[in-house]
Image (cartoon, grey):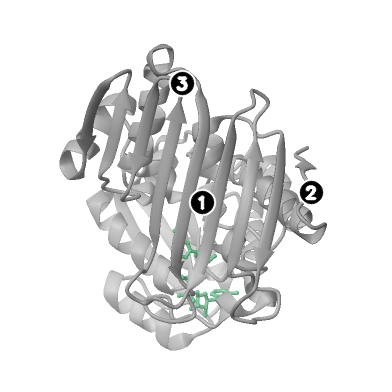
Amino acid sequence: MVVRVGFLGAGLIAHHHARSLARAGDRVRFVDCFDPDRDRAEGFAAAYGGGVATLVDEIIDAADAVFVCTWTAAHTPLVRAVADAGRAVFCEKPLAVNLAEATTMVEHVLRSGVINQVGLVLRRSPAFRWVAGTLARSGAEVGPVMSIVFRDDQYIPNQGLYDSTWRVEVAKGGSGTLLEHSIHDLDLIRWLMGPVESVSGRTANFHGYDGIEDLAHVQLNGPSGATASLISIWHDLLQRPSQRRVEVFCRRGYFHIEGDWHGPVSYDIGGRTGSLAGEALTAAAAELDGETDNPSVAFIDAVAAGRPAHPDFSVALEAHRLCDAAYRSAAAGGCPIDVD
Ligand SMILES: NC(=O)c1ccc[n+]([C@@H]2O[C@H](COP(=O)([O-])OP(=O)(O)OC[C@H]3O[C@@H](n4cnc5c(N)ncnc54)[C@H](O)[C@@H]3O)[C@@H](O)[C@H]2O)c1
């Protein structure tokens, strides 16, 4: 089956998906794209084929699957329109500007029954897949996860590669580094550590953009006593675009992720030590889970096969719940908040 793909929003991440879809070859055909910024829409169409639509409905009518790649506040009405038309939908993360809106959107999409996937792309990173897969396969050897120390820093993305004013406008982005960037990290922590019972958080705003925190420190507590600590920072060091450093401590195992896609990942599995990176890491992750590292193609393949895609909207909603609990805790001075 050739999957006809439409794009709503023709900015940075839309280009990224379009380039990734090249790996699907002639299994994909681009239909028109829509972006109120006409120059962007024309540039996108010129690069990947298809044309420029003047109405969102033209794209939805012509497509089997639609990528919603607008700034965050515009996701909800577009996702609803795509789902109402019965088309498969890929929505970028975060799903929405707050938990209430994300919840309503997810309920709507699940009721519609369309194939859905969210841009929590690190679920497809060889580094995280290898650690998650090894924890699952070697559980008895390494013992349970006791603690995760997760540090994520990037330059504030109204400059550099991102160059977007909306990321420092609360009406369009919702809030700052925790929602816009570290929703990935909250999802990864839940994936690696397991269920989260309570969350406490502190936020700060050094840059002074209204409602846009540029520092978040979150502690997540699991029912077993396991804890995770997340520090998410937006600074002005343009030479540090996005750096994640993650340590996972188990009773008899340790993992250290330094590059969030290609590694290196160093490990100690019950005394067996080593390090993996690049192609060796990609191959080792695929051997464990048989999955691809290309989220855009994975979505298209799910659509072509008529099967559920992953990670889907319900996975994203769990990350939104953690994010919301952290913000509520921060607003209350950092006290622990139970996660419903
Ligand atoms: N998965 C990831 O790792 C990742 C990385 C970057 C961005 N994102 C997410 O992708 C989304 C877009 O980010 P970006 O970096 O591409 O931003 P961007 O500013 O480069 O592009 C956003 C585009 O959306 C367009 N737009 C706004 N309202 C629209 C509407 N109603 N219909 C159609 N187009 C509309 C804008 O004109 C703009 O061109 C955000 O939600 C962001 O958080 C995810």
Count the marks.
Answer: 3
Q: Which mark is residue 168?
A: none
Q: Residues within 10 Å of mark 2 (few under 14, many from 20)?
A: some
Q: Which residue is mark 2?
A: 335
Q: Earlier in the sequence, mark 3 or mark 2?
A: 3
On whether ligand 1 comes within 8 Å of the CB at mark 1, the answer is yes
Q: Amino acid at mark 2?
A: Cys
Q: Position of residue 94 (x, y in %)?
A: 58, 58
Looking at the picture, does residue 104 appear above or below residue 81? above
Q: Which residue is mark 1?
A: 184
Q: Is residue 107 left or right of residue 130?
A: right
Distance from disc 1 to disc 3, alpha carbons, whole Å, reads 25 Å
Q: Which residue is mark 3?
A: 251
Looking at the picture, does residue 325 appear above or below residue 177? above
- Toward the bottom, the furthest residue is 39
On whether ligand 1 comes within 8 Å of the CB at mark 3, the answer is no
Distance from disc 3 to disc 2, alpha carbons, whole Å, reads 28 Å
Instruction: Locate residue 207: give its quadrant.
Output: bottom right
- Toward the right, the furthest residue is 332
Mark 1, secondary structure of its residue:
helix
Whether tag 1 and tag 3 are in contact, CB under 8 A, the answer is no
Is 171 or 237 nearer to us in this picture? 237
